[in-house]
Every structure is written in structure tokens, then in C-alpha cells.
Amino acid sequence: MSYYAYTILECTNPELISSGSSFVKESNSELLKIINDKSHFLTWKDTMDDEIIKLSLKHSGETFSAECHWDTEYYDRVKFFFEYKNGECKQLGIKPGYVFIGPAEKIPNEEEYSAFRNHLIKYFNRLDFVSIKDGKFIIDKLNNEKDQYGYESYVTITYENDTYKWTATKKGISWVEVSCEKKEPIIDPLKEFEDKMKNSRNEDNNELPF
């Protein structure tokens, strides 16, 4: 496991975690960016957890929400969700942090690729059940470990229209390999024959002297 975590922090008062706040200036974590009042931090070990607890004690009327995952986990990346208030931390749940590895070639259509990812997540949300056991959240994933014969199983989903065929293979909890191929045009033999006959008649008519 990496010593670094990626943490997305938001607050009922966004100014408390803004780039000019004392929290950011004094934190041992690096503020990477702020999007929609959510501050994205690169965190050393679990220092951010202690810092948020102290911040919530200092501002007892505020609620802080955090989403984090370890930065080098790709195959089994899990996102953890926490809520901080009055110095108390409550775990809200977990879910897979899907990592999409796009086609090696240039993506033919970014809008379609985005639609494909959304399509996949809807499927994965039905496959990756989150349960609670002994007070802990657990992702009940389909088994993809090698069996006694050396076989492994993966989840593969296709998404296609008349032009492109997208394929995604999910390995582990979060790793998703994506490929895209351009399909050959569908040829209707009857229509092709009718077009040839029509062209032939047109050519014959063009040869008439009147």
C-alpha cells in the first residue's frame, strides 16, 4: 500500500478549506485543485484524518465530508467516504474507484466514450455489492481468482452501434480495460442487387439515340 492518499474534502462553509484558508496553509498535505468548492489534496499517510478532526473541533457548527483512496491502488482501488463533525469521524461507506484504461489508439469520439463509461458504471453498480460484516463495509465482488485448473474469470461488456464497437473488461475490483473498433459497413445483398440493376438500366437508357 502506498503512503500517499488522494482526498477530496468539502464543507458546509467552503471558505474554511479554500486555497487562502489557514487550514490549507498549515496542512501537511498538498492542495492540488478546487472544483465546485471541493478541495483535492495529496495526503501523506493518514495525516489528513487528524487535521480534519481538529478542524471540525475548531468549527463545531460545520460538517466536513471526505472521499479518499490510496493513490497507487489500481486493480483493487476502493473509495472511502467519511463525515466529520464536532471532532467525531463517521464512516459513511465505500465503493469501487474504477480506473478506466482507454484504447491505445486515439479515442474516435469523446462524447461516446463518456457515455460508455456511464453505461459501464450502471452495470458495475449492480455487480459490486457493498455489504457490512462485523461493523465493516465490504465489497462483495465476483470471484476472479485462479481456480485449481488455472482458470480466471472477468466481466466483459460490449456497447455498439452500426459504426463502433466498444468493449470493456473489468479485472479485480476497479481495473477496467477499454478497447474500440470501427465496424465494417453492413451490406444488404438485396439492396446491393437492386442498386446494380438500377444503374444498369440507367446506362442502357443513356445509350438510346432518342
Image (tube, rainbow, N blue to C red):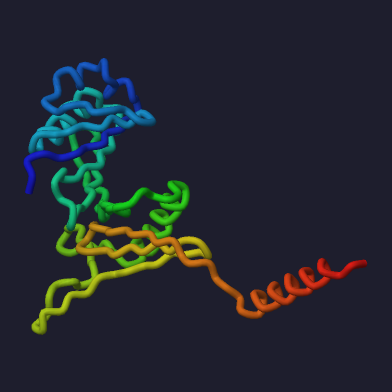
Image location of residue 148, percent across then percent down? 8, 83
Q: Nearer the viewer, residue 24 or 33?
A: 33
Relative side of 210 to 162, left or right: right
Which quarter of the figure is the C terminus placed in?
bottom right
Residue 153 falls in which quadrant of the image?
bottom left
Residue found 42% across the figure and 59% down from its top: 119
Answer above or below: position of 89 versus 143: above
Foreground of the two, 188 or 75: 188
Dividing the picture into quarters, in which one does residue 201 lie? Answer: bottom right
Q: Kindly give the residue lying farthest to the right in the view shown.
A: 210
The residue positioned farthest toward the front in the image shown: 209
Q: How many marks?
A: 0
Residue 115 x, y percent position in the rendering: 45, 53
Locate residue 93, reporting x and y percent: 26, 52
- Is residue 186 positioned above or below 29 on the image? below
Residue beneath the point at 28% across and 30% down: 39
**Residue at x 17% of width, y 75% of height:** 152
Which residue is located at x 27 percent, y 24 percent? 17
Residue 158: where, in percent of width, then height?
Answer: 40, 67
16 or 36: which is nearer to us? 36
